[in-house]
Amino acid sequence: MIIAGIDEAGRGCVIGPMVLGVVVADENVIFNNVKDSKLLSPNQREKLFDGIKQKCYEFKIIKIGVDEINKMMERKISLNEMEAMHMGEGLNCLKKDPDVVYIDSPDPIEQNFKKRIDKYYTGNAKIVAEHFADKKYPIVSAASILAKVERDAEIEKIKQELGFNFGSGYSSDERTIKFLKEHIFDSKVMKHVRKKWKTVDDLRQKNLNDFVMD
């Protein structure tokens, strides 16, 4: 039986793209040492990256850029819908339809995410959308690692372009927030920022208020 796993990296970040990893392999393939990418160090992920690609029949890395995320959010399209759309389209482009696809569901009700994907996926695979699939199924863990390594590489490119180490790009990262506070009106920076994020709205408003008070 051929199975596939899909997971994302960068879903909740404020800077940079969201990246989806798709891994297709025989169900009997053993991906040694894989686990949810968040539980691995960058060095561990890098070491596993090539081995995963060599063991699978096929893999895809799908990047959802900041421009697309911003435009879709302006149209009131949720992140969950964006993910489902790109996952469905990615599955449609596989050389061979897998028998089962395991997906880490971001929807509070697991089966709602399957319903979203069904709108875009035209194949015949059984879709299994579950919470914590990246911990339950090694094929999803493998996809998580591919997505995370690519996402980290994209963040490094942005840092090189801007000449500044702003950290992880997540709202929970103090370096990221400090960087955004200082560059919230810099167009070179903002082209990499998800402008519809509440974090960005709050920082922009605070800066405007501080300017008026000054």
Image (cartoon, rainbow, N blue to C red):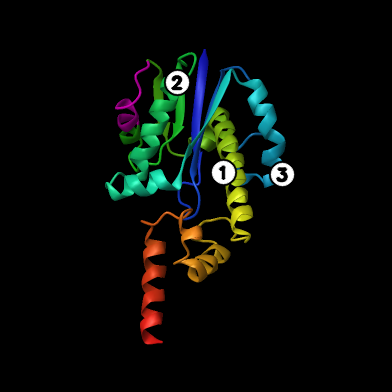
Give neighbour class at mark 1: few <14, some 14-19, many 20+ (Cα, 10 Å). Answer: many
Query: Circle 2 — which element?
Result: loop
Amino acid at pointer 1: Arg
Which residue is identified by label 2? 93
Q: Quadrant of residue 104?
A: top left
- Asked whether residue 86 is drawn in magenta, I would say no
Q: Magenta region: which residues?
A: 114-123
Q: What residue do we see at 56% from left, 25% from top?
A: 59
Distance of label 1 from label 2 (alpha carbons): 21 Å
Q: What amino acid is labelled 2 in the image? A: Cys
What's the distance in space between the residues labelled 3 and 2, CA to CA?
31 Å
In the image, which is nearer the foreground, mark 3 or mark 2? Answer: 2
Contact flag, marks 3 and 2 (Cβ < 8 Å): no
* Residue 31 visible, this orientation: no
Query: How far apart are labels 3 and 1 at the CA level?
Result: 14 Å
Q: Residue 151 — which label?
A: 1
Q: Is mark 3 on a helix, strand or loop?
A: helix
Q: Which of 121 and 180 is in front in this view?
A: 180
Query: Which amino acid is tagged 3?
Result: Asn
Measuring from the top left, give residue 37's x and y in whole percent: 59, 41
Q: Is residue 161 left or right of residue 6?
A: right
Furthest toward the left, the residue is 75
Q: Residue 12: x and y, percent?
A: 45, 51
Q: Name the residue under label 3.
A: 43
